[in-house]
Image (spheres, rainbow, N blue to C red):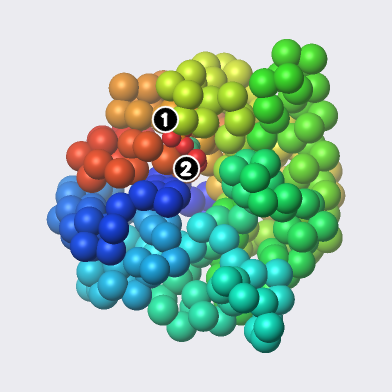
Amino acid sequence: MRKYIVAGNWKMNTTVPEGVELAKAVVAAAKELPANVELVVAPPFTHLYPVAEALKGSKVKLSAQNCADHEKGAYTGEVAVNMLTSVGCEYTILGHSERRQYYGETDEKLVVKTKLALEAGLKVILCVGENLDEREAGKHFDVVTAQTKAVLYNFTAEDLKKVVIAYEPVWAIGTGKTATAAQAEEIHACIRSVIAEKFGLEAADDMTILYGGSCKPSNAKELFAEKDIDGGLIGGAALKAEDFLGIAKSF
Ligand code: PEP
């Protein structure tokens, strides 16, 4: 059964006390949500433990924004998957375009990270998406297809039950420019067909595919009405509980 998810990527925003307040506000507002919509928050690493405490007793899930590509050892500044599960993370985001662009995250690294995360019992929110040049050159379907295959074709249909894909056109992230519902839907449908090609129709139909890129309460309804858009990965609007929940109520 396909799950509907709204996940908030807080990126490098909020202090720990601010993050805890935000988490508490999300928990309070989440009570009004229908049971078939899952809420996920992805604060910075420093916030995970206190935010996990704030989420206790609620249905809101905790996610990291990244994980290390090694299990443990001499990797200064990195955070391993078993550290994430030990503070109560259920998810990790991987392959966000900011990590691909600024931190040299390659598809090869993402295969390693996805493997480590799944083995540790974490679910993965894998981000894919084309940049503006690629869109203007008409290469968006090819880029997203290649990114999806490069990581997920190394796994099994069973593994894919623990994976969520987030389509995030880079030109729409934090720019206020949202993809139209039709532009997003055609890419989501393409991703679903890429999954079907290797893993079969059932796996493709069960796959949750989120849209990300300037999603807000005013445009979420139109996006989520599309048959292949199963929720959102939200950046800026996830920093205000009211907006985040406004998006989640748009199904
Ligand atoms: C994101 O970075 O995942 C994102 C979707 O950001 P924004 O909503 O701010 O565009």
Instruction: Name the residue rendered at 20%, 39% in the picture.
Output: 242
Q: Residue 103: give x, y in percent of width and height.
A: 67, 51
Name the amino acid, label 2. Answer: Leu
Query: Does the residue at mark 1 contact the one at mark 2 (Cβ under 8 Å)?
Result: yes
Residue 155 image-quadrant placement:
bottom right
Residue 246 image-quadrant placement:
top left
Task: Measure the C-alpha gap from mark 1 to mark 2.
Answer: 8 Å
Q: Residue 84: give x, y in percent of width and height.
A: 50, 75
Q: Is residue 177 above or below residue 110?
A: above
Dot 2: what SS?
A: strand
Instruction: Name the residue rendered at 48%, 63% in the picture.
Output: 64
Q: Residue 47: give x, y in percent of width and height.
A: 35, 66
Report which residue position mark 1 lands on: 215
Instruction: Name the residue rendered at 67%, 86% in the picture.
Output: 73
Give the camera-side residue of 248 and 1: 248
Instruction: Specify few, some or many for label 1: CA neighbours under 10 Å numbering under 14, 14-19, or 20 or more.
Output: many
Give the camera-side residue of 77 and 37: 77
Dot 1: what SS?
A: loop
Give the camera-side residue of 51 and 163: 51
Regarding residue 206, the answer to whether it shows in the image is no
Q: Residue 76: give x, y in percent of width and height.
A: 62, 76
Left or right: where 216 falls relative to 139: left
Assess mark 2: CB under 8 A from ligand 1?
Answer: yes
Assess mark 1: CB under 8 A from ligand 1?
Answer: yes
Left or right: where 57 falls relative to 93: left
Q: Earlier in the sequence, mark 1 or mark 2?
A: 1
Regarding residue 29, the answer to whether it shows in the image is yes
Report which residue position mark 2 lands on: 233
